[in-house]
């Protein structure tokens, strides 16, 4: 069976193209993807069978060999760096909590900085 990489795939339109290792381009319809798969990312290595369609070569049965690595996961901070950031965040929130116990909200500029920091840490944890 030939192999190649997904050149592009439009999930909304339900099709894309595979750049085969032999150098040809093969049409990829969503129906050729494995059961339960609705999309493939560009760069995904696939193995496929080919049939001649109305407009040229068309992939009939596709098997995903390996997906490209997630750019988000590659850009994540190492866990030991996140440990330090979370510990500092806990200290910062403890200080703010002490102010709340005395009936004081943090200053507006400080509150905005803490809120932005919380959002960034949440994004990092969610990646």
Image: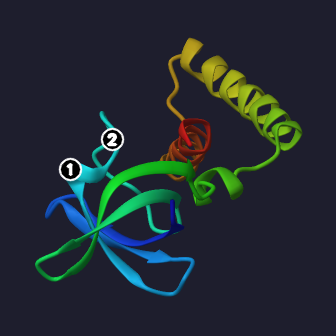
Rendering coords of residue 20 (x, y %)? 49, 76
Q: For residue 37, which numbered disc appears in the image?
A: 2
Q: For residue 31, which numbered disc appears in the image?
A: 1
Q: Is residue 7 above or below residue 24?
A: above
> Who's the residue at 58% across and 12% down the image?
101
> Who's the residue at 39% across and 55% down the image?
40
Q: Is residue 116 above or below residue 8?
A: above
Residue found at the far bottom of this picture = 23
Q: Compare marks 2 and 1 and give the one earlier in the sequence.
A: 1
- Give the class, few, some or many, for how many residues have Cα within 10 Å of label 2's Cα (few <14, many ≥20): few
Q: Are marks 2 and 1 in contact (CB under 8 Å)?
A: no
Instruction: Count all numbered tags in the image, as a single digit.
Output: 2
> Who's the residue at 50% across and 30% down the image?
105
Residue 42 picture quarter: bottom left
Depth check, front residue: 98 or 60: 60
Left or right of 106: which side holds 30?
A: left
Left or right of 13: which side holds 35?
A: right
Q: In this view, does 26 lie above or below 69?
A: below
């Amino acid at each position: 069976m030939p192999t190649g990489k997904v050149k592009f795939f439009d999930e909304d339109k339900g099709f894309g193209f595979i750049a085969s290792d032999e150098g040809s381009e093969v049409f990829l319809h969503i129906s050729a993807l494995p059961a339960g798969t609705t999309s493939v990312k560009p760069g995904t290595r696939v193995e496929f069978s080919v049939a001649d369609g109305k407009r040229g070569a068309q992939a009939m049965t596709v098997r995903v060999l390996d997906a490209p690595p997630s750019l988000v996961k590659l850009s994540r901070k190492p866990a030991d760096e996140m440990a330090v950031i979370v510990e500092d965040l806990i200290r910062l929130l403890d200080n703010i909590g002490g102010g709340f116990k005395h009936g004081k909200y943090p200053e507006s500029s400080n509150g905005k900085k803490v809120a932005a920091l919380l959002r960034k840490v949440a994004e990092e944890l969610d990646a």
